[in-house]
Amino acid sequence: TARQKGAVLFVSIHADAAPRPSAYGAPVFALSDRGATSETARWLADSENRSDLIGGAGSVSLGEDQMLAGVLLDLSMTASLASSLNVGQKVLSKMGGITRLHKSRVEQAGFMVLKSPDIPSILVETGFISNPSEARKLQTSAHQQALARSIHTGVRQFFHENPPPGTYVAWLRDSGKIASGPREHVVRSGESLALLAQRYQVSLGSLRTAN
């Protein structure tokens, strides 16, 4: 799994189909627990969640205190979703130079494959094979390579701006060897909630005092 491999980003890439042949464009999705942002997003999520390709969901160490665990899980999920939307928008922007987009912004839906709370995750649809025109393009190696390069460029831009601490890319940015972008917290794969508590300086005592 992504967590076992120490991944800091999970990208699920698909070519999808829709009931209407007229459906077109390449959408990029991040997780939403509040419902899909469009009918197409809802339909695709329902379809993918029934498939046997689900592989991103996992668990993090919750510890014994459920109140503390809940707070830290919310922190982790919030940071992960922010990073997912950030990298998703960068990928979508780069893909827009290669193919038609389904939406100009990252959509959100309840894809099970995106529900890991500690690894930023996006789902990329390269196009609709139910659309004859897009199906023909997706079969060509030139279009496949162009799409792959656009996804790679978007991911690389994200990590240049938000390198995980202790990585070579972080050293490059801190040394001024690559352009510095806005900093944000990137959840590291396998990061336990105990470490998150330490990072955010959250203690069970302070939580109880606040309540």
Image (spheres, rainbow, N blue to C red):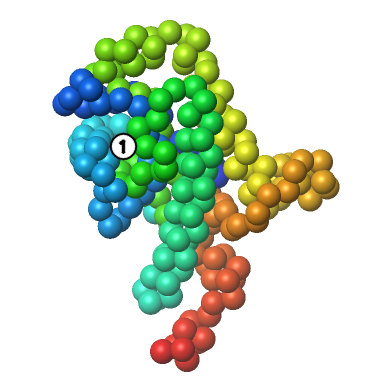
Q: Residue at x 34, y 9 (%)?
A: 136
Residue 131 position within the rendered picture, expressed as x and y whole percent measured from the top left: 26, 18
Q: Residue at x 25, y 53 (%)?
A: 35
Residue toward you, 122 or 60: 122
Q: Is residue 9 visible?
A: no
Question: Label 1: how many residues lie within 10 Å, few (<14), some (14-19) or many (20+)?
Answer: some
Q: Is residue 128 visible?
A: yes
Describe residue 58's horizontal placement relative to residue 34 as left or right: right
What's the amino acid at mark 1? Ile
> Dividing the image into 4 quarters, which one contains the N terminus?
top left
Q: Is residue 160 above or below residue 17?
A: below
- Residue on which disc 1 sits: 54
Residue 209 position within the rendered picture, expressed as x and y whole percent measured from the top left: 47, 91
The secondary element bearing badge 1 is classed as: loop
Residue 111 position within the rendered picture, expressed as x and y whole percent measured from the top left: 30, 43
Q: Quadrant of residue 199?
A: bottom right
Residue 81 position within the rendered picture, expressed as x and y whole percent measured from the top left: 44, 54
Q: Quadrant of residue 139?
A: top left
Q: Is residue 193 above or below residue 42?
A: below
Describe residue 102's horizontal placement relative to residue 9 as left or right: left
Q: Residue at x 53, y 31 (%)?
A: 94
Q: Residue at x 29, y 48 (%)?
A: 37
